Image (cartoon, rainbow, N blue to C red):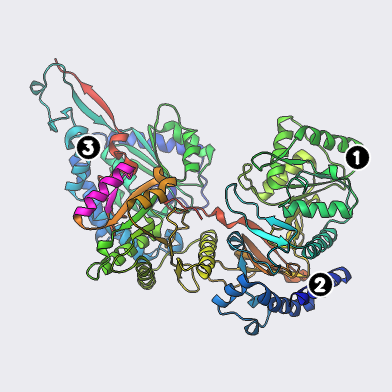
Amino acid sequence: MFSKLTQFAGHLDQAMVSGFDSDHFDLLALELFRLQWELNPAWQKLCRSRGVHPQSVSNWREIPCVPTAVFKLMDFSCLPEQGHCRVFHSSGTTGQTPGRHRHSSQSLALYEQSAWLWFKHNWGDVQDMIVLLPPPSLAPHSSLAHMIETIRCRENRTSDCFKGRVDGAGVWRVDWEPVIEELQQAAARGKPLDLFGTAFLYVHLLDELEARKLSLKLPAGSKAMETGGYKNRSREMPKAELHAWMGRRLGLLPGQIICEYGMSELSSQAYGRNGDSLKKADRLLRLPPWARVRVVSPENGEEVAPGETGLIQIFDLANAFSVMAIQTEDLGVWQDLDSCGLCGFELLGRSAKAEPRGCSLMTP
Amino acid sequence: MNLPDFFIADLPADAIVTPGLITSACEALKRNRKQHLKSRTTREIIHLLCEVGKEWRSPANPFRCHALRLDPEMTGFSRPILERGLEDFFAGFTSENWSALIARQLGGAGCLDAFTNQASNHTASPASVGPGRSQILALGPELMVHFAAGNLPIPAFMGICLGLILRSAQFIKCSSKASVLPRLFAHSIHALDPKIGSCIEIAAWPGGDAALETPLLDEADCVTMTGSDEAVNSIRMRMPAQARFLAHGHRVGFGYISREMLGAGSVNEMVSRVADDVTAWDQNGCLSPQVVYVEERGEVESDQFAGRVAMELGRRETLEPRGPISPEEAAAIVSRRAIAEALALHRADVKIWSSPKSTAWTVVFEHDVRYQGCPLNRFLLIKPVSGLEDVFRGMDGVRRHISSVGIGASPTQSADLALALARWGVPRICPIGRMQKPPLDWHQDGRPTLADMVSWSGFEAE
């Protein structure tokens, strides 16, 4: 059975490169569900408890999702117990048990292929890279650092583009002085660059620029990837506000900021651009054709209508060696823009941001 | 029912609240207080409060009818839950209860009206006070500002009542979508006594608006607030030095059922009472239980007890449905259920019961005694314990945040449990089933509410 999974992954890899045919998604999803059902005992148990069997599922929408919260409790992998070379951890608040996603060299290769191809599709040419994250050698459990490392390797850039480090408490830090100098030099030279970072690292960078009363004008053609949440590592702000601030301090126009949505439990990512001036279609987060999204009502699990809020579920074929159906803890709005034949989702953020309605201590 | 425009919150939705409007409202409140409220006697105020309570319990009262007809999307609660909550609250509005509150916290019902000897609780004649003793008079703040939290109306109602007892003008700032019940309450006072009604202002805006809140805080002599620690700190930092700030952060309640109550004769009563407490205000009040600890080895075992509570919550859902909740709240329940469901698949000591195809109610039975938060909205954790020591260990992380403990035990055992709980730091202990029905004179967060609000004036006679 495992060899069949390996075969599946090989075919998927080829299909990704040669142009994945969306019409095949359903068939492949059902095939993968059958294989993972056999090889992933934890998932099989969960499916059985919901009364779902491979025979009872007729399309990808009916495949039961594993909530990301459960990755903290058990292993959802098709790999043999010792058969991994890398484990990605979910980033959570310090002290919490992280969710774990194990990868073998083959599953990592599929992850890299998926990440790279969809990144390239959305990003285009890569300029000089400045990465505000620590390199994978310092953050071996970060899927984000690994993803950027994949881009770096495939683009033949030197590893000194990673500017982050990890302090004794495991917190990501950046020595801002040399980074700001490098940004200033790039601005002076007029050579476009590509900036990569999480929302909380951008808040720190912008704070540093503000403290120095610096407003840079990054050269035309520069881009910034903004991803991830805050995890209590800086003050939080709405996305639009952060992007407007990036515009003021870094000279980036709305179309130059590209949002990435990914997580350690997945092998594919979604991309979108932010900015009120952009067309709605450009602002939606979209997954590669080998992954699909559903937005479901947290109240009853039913798919929500376009424009309504719900929990984001992702069905990712590139998660061939773990579990292909994931229910995130993020709320989003499903958008089906018929006029342009596009659909995708808007991210509203973590569901844990529930506003208490009374005076009882609420801790989701 | 069309409410007249007495309060800022009565203005049309598109009306803009400005800092100038806040300042002039505060000035008007102080003026009206001087004219209409300051010289009222305690007896008159208690009479008014009792009338208000009577009106709200009367099925024909237009304000009550209006409140109960409101869309649950507006109030946050289903009609039966709102009705029960209002009924329980106003049932305590008796002259004896109000007098007892004042006597207990200030030393005597007359101390707000004239100089008294605190010890005797009677108005003092100068002759009865010897040298070295003074007579004292309790004075309420000129202007009180209440920051009311979320949908739960009771803290705002209670704040207004306490303010009236102290003859204070009051400005109640509600959260932007939850002003309707405080508004109706203030209108009901206005209807009985328009002059006193003119000493109350109700307004609503999204919290944290410094442009509106700074002028309001500048006018206040005493500010009360119920809210998250974050919201409380944000106001605390902006408080002017001369004003008093009484904040109540978010709190945790829990239940404790002794094994002697798990026999055939009493277990059904216990199940019903736990359901009463969990469904009251849909578990959103600071006195609501989030966890119920159940002693092991009762006639009915703790996991069976949990199953019975789940069945009862299912039954209550058909009679007193939970109110609508936000996608964020529902998602928090989904996430916690997912963890419990996954654990239950692999471990025999974790069990979960939940409403099918909705998040209406959830019971999780687990042996881990540690408190690990609760997404509320009828999500109850039931944990077996061998005794109170397990409870103290489990709740240690939130010891300073405990509001109330509801106990199910015999009278003798209750007294022992209460003493141990009090010494551990619990400010209120009550029978299970009455957690959301505190008496008027309860010490919120262990503090005497009225006593914290007043100032004293002393008179030393010749």
Magenta highlight range: B412-430
Considering only vertical position in the picture, is B361 above or below B369?
below
Lateral position of residue B417 relative to residue A151, left or right:
left
**Which is closer to the viewer, label 2 or label 1?**
2
Q: What is the x, y in percent for residue B408? A: 27, 58
Lateral position of residue A339 relative to residue B49, left or right:
right
Residue that extends furthest to the bottom in the rendered view of this protein: A55
Q: Are marks 2 and 1 in contact (CB under 8 Å)?
A: no
* Amino acid of disc 3: Arg
Q: Which mark is residue A12?
A: 2
Q: What is the x, y in percent for residue A149? A: 81, 51
Residue underneath mark 3:
B40
Q: Residue A117 carries which label?
A: none
N-term mark: 2 or 1: 2
Q: Residues within 10 Å of mark 1 (few under 14, many from 20)?
A: some
Residue B370, magenta (yes or no): no
Q: In which quarter of the image is residue A193?
A: top right
Residue beneath the point at 77% across and 49% down: A136
Residue underneath mark 1:
A190
* Amino acid of disc 1: Gly
Circle 3 chain: B
**Which is closer to the viewer, label 1 or label 3?**
1
Respond whether the residues carrying marks 2 and 1 are from the same subunit.
Answer: yes
Residue beneath the point at 46% across and 49% down: B175
* Amino acid of disc 2: Leu
Lateral position of residue B323 relative to residue B95, left or right:
right
Task: State how far apart marks 1 and 3 are (Cα).
Answer: 76 Å
Q: Quadrant of residue B328?
A: bottom right
Circle 2 chain: A
Of A8 and B23, nearer the camera is A8
